[in-house]
Image (spheres, helix red, strand yellow):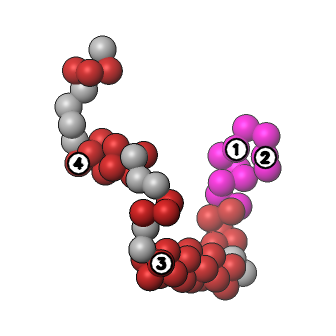
Amino acid sequence: MRGTLPMTLARRFAAYVAGLAYEAIPAQVLHEAKRRVIDAVACAMGAAVEPPIAAARRAARRLSPSGE
């Protein structure tokens, strides 16, 4: 059944990434990708104490079955 799924852009991208060897990625691309990940983590850490994020955490806790 798997062979009958449509080859969407997401599937094409996933197939490309799955077949990509780390060694084939240019050093500059890896450097920039790492910068983006660090930037995203830093933004998330900085925003973690802001009121809208605290409200979102409270809402998520209320919706969570375990309350965590």
Q: Which residue is mark 4?
A: 9
The image shows residue 22 at horizontal and vertical percentages of: 50, 60
Which mark, by number, is residue 67? 2
The image shows residue 21 at horizontal and vertical percentages of: 46, 55
Identity of the amino acid at label 1?
Ser
Q: Which numbered disc, 4 or 2, marks the residue that appears first in the sequence? A: 4
Q: Which residue is mark 1?
A: 64
Residue 54 appears in the figure: yes
Q: Could you tell me which secondary element the residue under label 3 belongs to?
A: helix
Residue 50 appears in the figure: no
* Residues at marks 4 and 1, CA–CA distance in whole angstroms: 33 Å
Q: Is residue 46 above or below residue 55?
A: below
Identity of the amino acid at label 3?
Ala
* Magenta segment includes 62: yes
Front position in the image: 3 or 24: 24
Q: Are marks 3 and 1 in contact (CB under 8 Å)?
A: no
